[in-house]
Image (spheres, grey):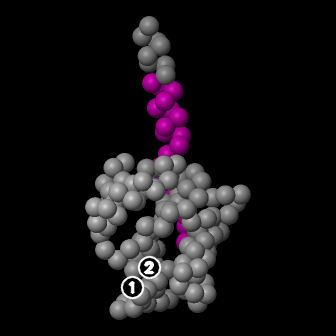
């Protein structure tokens, strides 16, 4: 009886430790470039094609399996913000999924303010449940109740 309880627990701990924490792709790596390119492509759809050549200052980049979280803003080559006082003065909060070796944006929570209660309800309702909690920042985990 005791072995039936301990063995599954031990297996679960080993499997959990093998999965590990989210990783951050190194600067200049193909994966990091592919994620940034997917974010640029997504933003170009609403902000115009000039976005395709913009640089980002990345505050957070987490990858867990087929999912990624990107947090960053438009920046000059020295890393200082480039959109201050303009419509580009925003920190982007974007979730992506790798589909057939291509990163695609699946949720964009970028905003200029804290969401209202009704917005939070909509975000909770529409947020993809498949996104692992390990890549969701604590601010959004609280709103999502995850």
- Expressed as whole percent of the image width and height from the top left, the position of residue 126 reads 46, 56
Mark 1 element type: loop
- Expressed as whole percent of the image width and height from the top left, the position of residue 43 reads 54, 78
Position above or below: 1 against 112 = above
Mark 2 element type: strand
Q: Residue furthest front?
A: 118
Residue 23 drawn in magenta: yes
Tell me the residue at 50%/80% (across/down): 56
Q: Which mark is residue 144?
A: none
- Expressed as whole percent of the image width and height from the top left, the position of residue 19 reads 53, 43
Q: Which residues are magenta?
A: 9-29
Position above or below: 105 against 80 = above
Q: Nearer the viewer, residue 61 or 108?
A: 108
Label 2, on which residue?
73
Disc 2 to disc 1, C-alpha distance: 8 Å
Q: Nearer the viewer, residue 35 or 94?
A: 94
Counting labels gives 2
Residue 135 left/right relative to 31: left
Q: Nearer the viewer, residue 119 or 31?
A: 119
Residue contact between numbered discs 2 and 1, judged by CB atoms under 8 Å = yes
Label 1, on which residue?
89
Q: Quadrant of residue 84?
A: bottom left
Q: Residue furthest top?
A: 1
Q: Nearer the viewer, mark 2 or mark 1?
A: 1
Tell me the residue at 63%/70% (across/down): 34
Tell me the residue at 46%/32% (across/down): 13
Residue 10 drawn in magenta: yes
Residue 14 visible in the displayed image: yes
Tell me the residue at 68%/63% (across/down): 102
In the picture, the quarter occupied by the N terminus is top left
Q: Residue furthest right?
A: 100
């Amino acid at each position: 009886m005791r072995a039936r309880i301990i063995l599954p627990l031990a297996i679960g701990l080993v499997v959990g430790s093998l999965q590990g924490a989210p990783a951050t792709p190194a600067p200049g790596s193909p994966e990091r470039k592919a994620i940034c390119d997917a974010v640029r492509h997504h933003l170009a759809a609403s902000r115009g094609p000039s976005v395709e050549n913009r640089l980002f200052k990345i505050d957070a980049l987490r990858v867990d399996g087929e999912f990624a979280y990107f947090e960053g803003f438009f920046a000059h080559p020295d890393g200082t913000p480039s959109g201050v006082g303009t419509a580009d003065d925003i920190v982007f909060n974007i979730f992506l999924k790798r589909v057939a070796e291509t990163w695609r944006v699946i949720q964009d929570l970028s905003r200029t303010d804290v969401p209202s209660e009704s917005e939070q309800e909509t975000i909770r309702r529409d947020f993809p449940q498949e996104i692992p909690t390990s890549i969701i920042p604590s601010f959004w985990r609280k709103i999502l109740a995850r």
